[in-house]
Image (tube, helix red, strand yellow):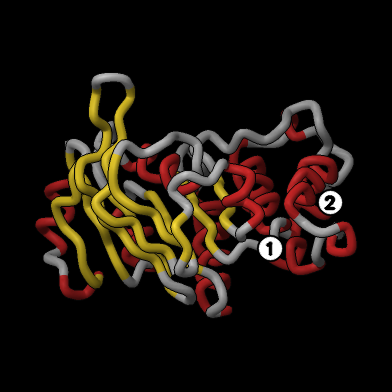
Amino acid sequence: MLEVEKVDLHYGAAIALRNVSVSAGAGAVTCVMGRNGVGKTSLLRAIVGAHPISAGSIRWEGHEISRLPMYERAKRGIAWVPQGRDVFPLLTVKENLETGFAVLPRGQRKVPDEIFDLFPILKTMLRRRGGDLSGGQQQQLSIARALVMKPRLIVLDEPTEGIQPSIIKDIGRVIALLRARGDMAILLVEQYFDFARELAQTMVVMDRGDVVLSGRQQDLDEADVRRRLSV
């Protein structure tokens, strides 16, 4: 469904991605891993349209999207859960969820019941402001807001960062359920190997803007992957 081929990305004169290729298909989790500052977030920003690429190609469902603006990619079913969550602190949980309506036809602008099946805590907090939630609750809200868009590709940037273990388990359970549905491609940036191993069918390891390892999880040498993740 998603094909990123030989992508370069620059910030001014600095190169953040160099000849990067990644793919992601429906019913599977592709996990991008690496130390801090190796280009993982830049790759996601390129895919969702938050930053233009300098070279290469990004194709989604057979169509070239490299030059499409971010909102057009969202309309085509690409949802982004950014690092740091980025919920609207002064809006209620209900209002945060409803911001996902922007890309939907008017007849579909309803928060699906499935959202509260996946994240039951949010149903009890609909009137609370986003800024009053804990970090873990905000992360659940950020993922739920993306799912309101009814995406066919969800891009998650380190959803476990700074989150307590109980909510990490809940987030892992939700990703596994979304994977099992079979109709969504999931691209996950993660630093915790054990979390990624439980979920990912494919792993991509980056270093200094390059892909240095890529393949099916079971085919990669765990010790080699862990070595490339350690500081």
Task: Say which residue appears at 11% left-offset and 59% top-offset.
Answer: 223
Q: Quadrant of residue 40?
A: top left
Q: State whether residue 4 is above or below residue 132.
A: below
Q: Quadrant of residue 43?
A: top left
Task: Say which residue appears at 58% left-offset and 38% top-offset.
Answer: 85
Q: Residue 115, how many percent across, how many down?
A: 74, 62
Q: Amino acid at mark 1?
A: Lys
Secondary structure under tag 1 reads loop
State the mark number for residue 106: none
Q: Amino acid at mark 2?
A: Thr
Residue picked out by circle 1: 150
Q: Residue 123, how many percent across, how many down?
A: 82, 55
Question: In the rendered view, does 97 fall on the left or right side of 147?
Answer: right
Residue picked out by circle 2: 124
Nearest to viewer (mark 2 / mark 1): 1
Q: Residue 111, how many percent across, how many down?
A: 82, 59
Question: In the rendered view, does 118 fall on the left or right side of 198?
Answer: right
Q: Residue 164, how many percent across, how many down?
A: 52, 44
